[in-house]
Structures are given as C-alpha cells and as structure tokens.
Amino acid sequence: MALQVEKSRISNPIDFDRNGRQAGYLRAPLSRNTSGWGVVEIPIISVKNGSGPTILLTGGIHGDEYEGPIAISRLARTLDPARVQGRVIMIPAYNIPAVLNDTRLSPVDNRDMNRCFPGNPKGTFSEMLAHFLDGYILPLADVSVDLHTAGHSGDSAPSTNMHYLPDPAMRKKTMEAAAAFGAPYNTVFWGVDEGATFTSCVERRGAISLGTELGGWGRVNVEGVRIGRRGVDNILKHFGVVEGKPETAQRDGSAGTRHMMVRDPACYSFAPAGGLFEPTNLVGEEVKAGQPAGWVHFVEDVDRDPIQVNYHRDGVLWMSAGPGRVARGDTIAVVMSDYDDKLAAG
C-alpha cells in the first residue's frame, strides 16, 4: 500500500525493491549564504536478496555518539548480498551536520533531532530529517536498531534499551532481540521525555524497536565499538537475515544479557545547582539508595561547600554524568534494577 505521508523535500537514490547492494546519498536541501541551492548528503546503503524481514540500522542521530556509526559503516562495507535473506537498510550517520560537528544538537538549527519526531517536511532541518526517516524509511522496516551512546552528556554501561511495551507478545519479541544483540545489559525504561523520539515512532508503526547506549563522555569507547559491531551481526543472525547463531557470551564470564529496568522517577538523580560534578561510582557498579552519587563543587567560590547528591534506588549505575560541569536540572545518575515483569506491569 502506498505511503500516505506528506511529500518530503529530501531526495533518495535507492530503489528499496531492487536486489543486490546499493549505496548512495540522501540529499537534504539546505540553502545557505554561500549556496542557495545547496544540499547535505547523507550516506545510505541497502542490501537485499531473497525473502526475509527488513532490518533498519541507524546511527548518528546525535552527532557526538560514535560507536554506532563505526559499527554500521563497517557492516555496510562488508555485508555480502549473497549471504542475505531479506533486506538490510543502513544509515550510519543520519544527522550528518551534527556528526561532522561532534555535537548532540544539529549546528544547522540547534535542535535535538531525537526530540523532533514524527517531524515536519516544511519545518526546521532536524524536523525535515525526522519526517523523512519516519515517513519514508521506517514503514519498510520490521525491526529497527538505533545505536546511541551517552555522548558528552555522561557515560553509560554498555546496553541495549527498550520502552516497556504493554503488549506481552511484542515485549517478549523485543526482549528476545535484545538478548540476541548481546550487550551486557538490556534496560527496559520509562523515559523522561519520550513522546517525540524515534523509538516512539517505531512503536507506533508496530515494528520491533531496539536502542543502545554503548559508552559516552565524548570519546570512542573501545568496548562499546566491539559490542556494537558484534550486536548488529547478531541481530541479522537472530532474525534469519544471515546464517549463524548469535554470540552472546560476556567478558565477565556470564552467558548472556542481564535484563534490567528503570521503573520510576526515583531511579534518576538530578543536579540541584550548576557546578563541577564529582561522581562516586563508575557505570556498571552496584549502588545503594542513600549513598552519594557524587558532589557538585563550586570551585569558583572559595568558601562554598559542595552539595552531596544521593542515589534514591538500589541497583546498578546505568548512566553517570561527568566528570565535568553540570547545570541545575541535569541528570547526574540513573540507576537500573533487575527486570521483574510483575513490577514492570504495576
């Protein structure tokens, strides 16, 4: 059935119905002082053969999150169409202005693209990108894996993540996909601001939606790249797009992924003031409610005491800000606990 979406301003060279490997560039118009008819070119790759599901792999929706673009680019260069049963659509660096600028927000319109969905073809540059991805690419997908890290916001324990899904069958399929990806953790969460995210669009369209958090602190995490590269291979194996069994063994000797959840606002700790944040723990460490998550220091004020910020839940530290400067209201810690389906549904 034809897509009933408003016409996009972005041009696409890929024929998604054609077998074989196709690689090219989406062209998003961007008029600027030095180029009235200028475009921004966004790499896109499609590999199709035989019959099977469509897997969509996206990276670079935030420009300072590097592990996903590396993992997807490697797969895009090496995936042999003869091995494929189905279709793999790969967009390694979708928000290319932000990727080239090493920033979370687009330097074109200063927007977080992952808060712009489902987008607007006549809106800002980020809204235009969001509209094309939601309206023209996502309807083709049976499974979406959107690779993220914490970027410059902080650090994260290497993990896949998903929203809690009320439908038991879809929740089971998504958790099975997460286990196949093979990160150390899979976090089921209820986010602070999720209505305008890509994940929410995938869910509304009924496809399996999986995200990742594979590091952060504004650098390339060596282990995050390894987990991401293995994970995208594992997803193709899990859904039968390529032959093979997913490899899920962990570096700590465990056989697979530990399912976790971030159930309520008490899992989050926020900075009560702007200052220099000193964290107490590394991500992946066990923490206790009432223990200090860290201290906000005011190094510019000679006699001002630091403020201690505590954890409010027992569990494992999923995300941590800093070390670095924080503003009042910034999330400085997120604690996850072992997944319990009865508690999650409550």
Image (cartoon, rainbow, N blue to C red):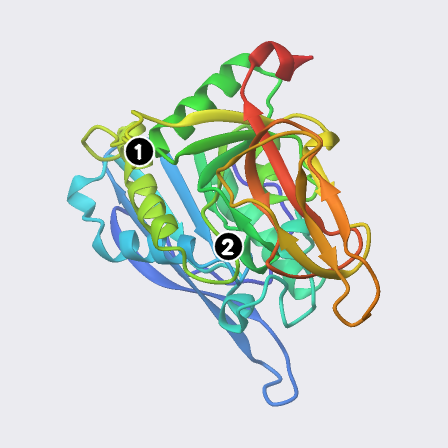
Q: Which residue is mark 1?
A: 250
**Residue pushed farthest front?**
303
**Residue pushed farthest bottom?**
34
Q: Is residue 290 above or below residue 156?
A: above
Can residue 141 be seen by looking at this rendering?
A: no
Please provide percent x and percent y for residue 258.
43, 26
Badge number at residue 101:
none
Q: Quadrant of the C terminus?
A: top right
Can residue 104 be seen by looking at this rendering?
A: yes
Mark 2, other Cα within 10 Å: few <14 / some 14–19 / many ≥20: many
Q: Which amino acid is tagged 2?
A: Gly
Residue under the point 78% across and 72% down = 300
Front residue of this view, candidates 263 and 118: 263
Q: Secondary structure at mark 2?
A: loop
Residue under the point 67% across and 57% down = 277
User: Mark 2 or mark 1: which comes first in sequence?
Assistant: 2
Q: Is residue 31 above or below residue 99?
A: below
Residue under the point 76% across and 59% down = 327
Mark 1, other Cα within 10 Å: few <14 / some 14–19 / many ≥20: some
Q: CA distance from mark 2 to mark 1?
A: 20 Å
Front residue of this view, candidates 206 and 16: 206
Q: Which amino acid is tagged 1?
A: Gln
Residue under the point 55% across and 28% down = 206
Please provide percent x and percent y for residue 113.
63, 56
Badge number at residue 216:
2
